[in-house]
């Protein structure tokens, strides 16, 4: 308490009382500890397989066979990396993956953004039909063989377009973008129109710059899904130099372990097993690009999924 | 607001159009080119074919031809367009391939899609019976048995090696078969059990000859190493079988039944002259009994039925187990390498132990083979194609070429007199380990798509001396006859498949329980009744009916 005597001029004002810290209740502290333990457990469980594969990729084959490789490489060597990186098919396929991902993401983004923007305008005639068409495809699908026949007869087989076009618009992403565009205040666009911007001008100069978060999120969603996709490429590509690296990887791993049991007896090639270290190295090399980008963009993921969920 | 989703009733017109549309789609999906004439007039299809082509002739097309083919890319030796195999083949036969490359991991699926879409390549190899049955109804594949006159080498081998009975296994209800299988002169026994021979020596155990000997050997090993399971097996997936499926198959052969990977629902009882349900047989019970004894005496690791191959191999590599199922390749590629770090450890694959069936072996001398698209029948190069397939897959020269390559470049000598040797720098599996050029990876020979089957001499040329010793013992065993054909019609097959799926699940489940002791074998009769409740009787009656009707129609 400050007394009158202490207020006499010349004396410095006394320091304000120290900030009172609210002591967390015991219940809250217990929660914090338990929470931390559980989350650390989840992190360990999620990280362990990856660290294990990383360790295997640097280990010697015999150490892996004995099962002695856990988190640290045994028999550290780089020969497996050298072997895989010398394989020209691996790099061809890697280049294909990058190519397909970049082109597909670009096209998907353009198409999705345009479609979503258009759908966000309530005064569009036939809007409900357009939405209906998109939503319909979420529930119904032509089936594997009709899709194959369609793509085949359009002459898209063995081209990049067989991977890019059929999967260009993901309806979930479309709806999220539409909701986001709807949440932008209409007055902004009206003001821009008053100033003389055309529809395309509004889209390009007003709406898109405001949508950076949702665009970054969608780019990431699409890029990751195209990077990981193998099925379209496997189905529509007939030449091994057109496969993406995911098909290469799948052949290495699934091909090595799944031999037709009852027929194995007489076929000499099904008993070939690709070394576990080669599998591990290929996995690591395939995952590295996405892994390097993720930490820098993952904040968009978190905010991006909720975008447009709350209006106003 | 009006829209397509607010109306909740379709007008009659819409319903009619919808129905017509669906019907049209369904019909359009059917292939509109069936096999065309079967057998029949081939005068319009002889372009490029040799006028005179017989056994021992080198096939060479009279004009350059190209055939589309599905090529499986094995990750161990991935497809390479620059393989000498392709160029040398074109040089010798004037035929080049237009390949559709498919990864091994999903070969069957892509084949199904392509054939279903009517877009499949002309030649579809790597097809395991009965996979071709799925494509017969749509008319997408050729009934090859109608065209054997175009394939002299195929017919010659069938006659020479008495393969008619094996081929009959592939016949469908119409009496034809739709797959050109790989042909072996003799049953190729490859699988058996591998044992740590240094442990045998140390404990003074003789190499077991019978399954009782194996039991005694395991007991001795357990007595010396009480804290370990001497046997921990692998190959528990895929099925069929409850786990340790290769071991079960081997035991099945020894006891006179089908088990594990060899499991088939019907067993031909020659004395009774009819088929019986395998899962209910006494001999099947004996197999389960044998394994149950091993498990209860703690000689076999119960995890054998469920663990992954990697886990089983790890136990082997750590020296915790001494016995495991194997084939020739695995001994060299895996087992020996795994124990290389244990001083003095040695491993050998022992001749298959014998059971009540004695010194016999079971097996099929046909293996995976080639399907041909039905639309090839109308191509003007059809005859040339059949002759080409006959040469590459069934002639002695073609088989030798596909397997070992070019004399002077990849090998020297001959397989017929034992002088065969790989070229100094060429290596394959256990042969010529010091070579740097792998026959499959660098040259494209011994590719599983083209090289399989053949005479016993051709087969023996790929074995290192230890495997040859094994083969000599097995060749001395009598090959048991195969069951008579009992093909089902499409409807019967559908019904049978429904029953089979249900039954197999139950048999596998209960077999696992019996082996692990979770269900006592004294409940066997109850189990048989449960099988009957799952239509095992109806199933077997169906099979027996099919057998009788085939016998009447085709003798």
Image: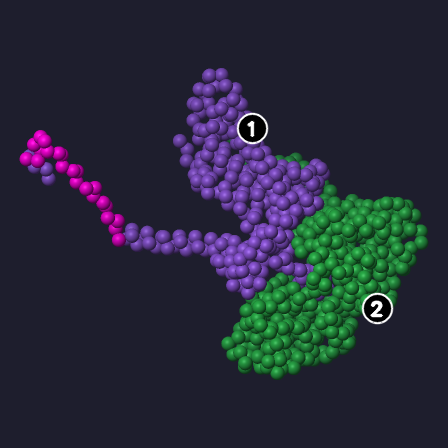
Chain colours: A purple, B green
> Would residue B340 appear left or right of A215 to someone viewing this image?
right
* Both marks 1 and 2 on one chain: no
Q: Can residue A192 be seen in this view?
A: yes
Secondary element type, mark 2: loop
Task: Tell me the tag on residue B366.
Answer: none
Quarter holding residue B328: bottom right
Please say whether residue A10 is one of the residues in the magenta stretch.
yes
Viewport quadrant of the C terminus of chain B: bottom right
Q: Look at 55% across and 40% down and name the residue there.
A: A223
> Would residue B324 appear left or right of B118 to someone viewing this image?
left
Question: What span is in magenta?
Answer: A5-26
> How far across and down, in percent of the image, does residue A51 sit?
49, 54
Q: Do the residues labelled 1 and 2 touch (CB within 8 Å)?
A: no
Q: How crowded is mark 1: few (under 14 residues within 10 Å), some or many (20 or more)?
A: few
Q: Nearer the viewer, residue B384 or B553?
A: B384
Please say whether residue A107 is one of the residues in the magenta stretch.
no
The chain containing the residue under callout 1 comes to A
Q: Look at 62% across and 80% down and name the residue there.
A: B201
Q: How crowded is mark 2: few (under 14 residues within 10 Å), some or many (20 or more)?
A: few
Task: Tell me the tag on residue A126.
Answer: 1
For the stretch drawn in magenta, what is the main secondary structure?
Answer: loop
User: Is residue B190 depicted above or below A9 in this figure?
Assistant: below
Q: Name the residue under label 2.
A: B417
Q: Is residue B133 visible?
A: no
> How far across and down, in percent of the image, does residue B439 sit?
73, 57
> Would residue B402 appear left or right of A290 to someone viewing this image?
right
């Amino acid at each position: 308490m400050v007394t009158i005597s202490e207020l006499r001029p010349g004396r410095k004002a006394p320091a304000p009382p120290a900030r009172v810290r609210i002591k967390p209740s015991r219940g809250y502290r217990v929660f914090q500890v338990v929470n931390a333990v559980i989350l650390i457990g989840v992190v360990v469980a999620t990280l362990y397989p990856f660290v294990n594969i990383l360790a295997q990729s640097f280990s010697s084959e015999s150490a892996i066979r004995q099962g002695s490789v856990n988190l640290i490489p045994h028999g550290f060597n780089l020969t497996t990396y050298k072997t895989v990186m010398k394989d020209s098919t691996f790099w061809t396929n890697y280049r294909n993956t990058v190519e397909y991902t970049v082109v597909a993401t670009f096209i998907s983004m353009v198409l999705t953004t345009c479609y979503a923007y258009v759908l966000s305008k309530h005064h569009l005639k036939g809007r409900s039909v357009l939405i209906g068409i998109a939503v319909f495809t979420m529930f119904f699908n032509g089936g594997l063989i009709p899709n194959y026949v369609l793509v085949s007869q359009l002459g898209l087989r063995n081209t990049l377009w067989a991977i890019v076009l059929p999967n260009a618009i993901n309806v979930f992403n479309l709806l999220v973008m539409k909701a986001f565009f709807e949440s932008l205040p209409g007055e902004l666009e009206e003001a821009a129109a008053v100033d003389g911007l055309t529809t395309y001008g509004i889209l390009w100069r007003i709406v898109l710059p405001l949508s950076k978060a949702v665009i970054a999120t969608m780019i990431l969603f699409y890029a990751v899904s195209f990077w990981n996709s193998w099925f379209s490429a496997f189905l529509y590509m007939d030449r091994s130099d057109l496969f993406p690296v995911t098909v290469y990887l799948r052949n290495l791993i699934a091909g090595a372990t799944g031999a037709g049991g009852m027929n194995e007896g007489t076929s000499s090639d099904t008993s070939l097993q690709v070394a576990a270290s080669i599998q591990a190295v290929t996995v690591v090399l395939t995952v590295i690009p996405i892994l390097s980008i993720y930490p820098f963009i993952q904040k968009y993921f978190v905010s991006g999924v909720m975008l447009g969920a709350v209006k106003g | 607001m009006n829209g397509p989703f607010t109306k909740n009733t379709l007008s009659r017109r819409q319903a009619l159009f919808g129905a017509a549309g669906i019907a049209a789609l369904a019909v359009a999906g059917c292939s509109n080119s069936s096999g065309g004439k079967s057998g029949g007039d081939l005068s319009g299809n002889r372009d490029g074919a040799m006028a005179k082509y017989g056994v021992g002739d080198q096939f060479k097309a009279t004009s350059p031809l190209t055939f589309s083919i599905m090529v499986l890319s094995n990750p161990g030796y991935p497809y390479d367009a620059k393989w000498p195999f392709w160029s040398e083949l074109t040089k010798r036969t004037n035929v080049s391939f237009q390949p559709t490359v498919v990864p091994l991991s999903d070969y069957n699926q892509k084949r199904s899609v392509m054939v279903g879409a009517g877009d499949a390549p002309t030649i579809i190899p790597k097809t395991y019976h009965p996979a071709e049955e799925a494509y017969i109804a749509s008319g997408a594949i050729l009934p090859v048995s109608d065209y054997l006159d175009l394939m002299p080498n195929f017919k010659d081998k069938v006659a020479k090696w008495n393969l008619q009975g094996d081929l009959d296994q592939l016949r469908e209800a119409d009496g034809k078969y739709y797959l050109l299988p790989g042909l072996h002169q003799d049953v190729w026994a490859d699988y058996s059990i591998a044992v740590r021979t240094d442990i045998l020596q140390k404990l003074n155990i003789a190499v077991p000859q019978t399954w009782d000997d194996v039991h005694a050997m395991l007991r001795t090993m357990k007595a010396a190493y009480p804290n370990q399971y001497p046997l921990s097996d692998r190959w528990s997936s895929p099925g069929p079988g409850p786990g340790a499926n290769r071991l079960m198959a081997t035991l099945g052969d020894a006891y006179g039944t089908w088990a594990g990977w060899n499991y088939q629902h019907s067993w031909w009882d020659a004395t009774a002259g009819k088929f019986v349900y395998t899962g209910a047989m006494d001999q099947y019970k004996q197999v389960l009994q044998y394994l149950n004894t091993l498990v209860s005496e703690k000689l076999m690791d119960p995890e054998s039925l469920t663990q992954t191959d990697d886990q089983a191999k790890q136990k082997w590599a750590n020296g915790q187990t001494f016995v495991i199922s194997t084939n020739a390749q695995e001994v060299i590629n895996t087992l020996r390498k795994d124990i290389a770090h244990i001083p003095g450890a040695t491993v050998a694959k022992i001749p298959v132990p014998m059971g009540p069936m004695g010194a016999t072996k079971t097996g099929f001398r046909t293996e995976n083979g080639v399907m041909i698209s039905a639309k090839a029948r109308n191509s003007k190069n059809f005859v040339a194609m059949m002759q080409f397939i006959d040469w590459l897959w069934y002639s002695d020269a073609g088989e030798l070429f596909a397997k070992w390559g070019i004399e002077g470049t990849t090998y020297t000598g001959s397989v017929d007199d034992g002088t065969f040797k790989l070229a100094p720098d060429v290596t394959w599996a256990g042969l010529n380990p010091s070579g740097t050029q792998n026959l499959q990876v660098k040259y494209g020979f011994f590719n599983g798509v083209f090289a399989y089957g053949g005479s016993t001499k051709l087969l023996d040329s790929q074995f290192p001396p230890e495997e040859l010793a094994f083969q000599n013992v097995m060749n001395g065993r009598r090959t048991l006859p195969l069951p008579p054909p009992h093909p089902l019609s499409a409807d019967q097959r559908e019904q049978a498949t429904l029953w089979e799926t249900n039954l197999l699940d139950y048999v596998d489940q209960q077999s696992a329980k019996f082996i692990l002791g979770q269900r006592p074998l004294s409940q066997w009769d109850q189990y048989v009744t449960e099988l009957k409740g799952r239509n095992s009787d109806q199933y077997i009656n169906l099979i027996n009916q099919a057998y009788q009707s085939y016998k009447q129609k085709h003798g």
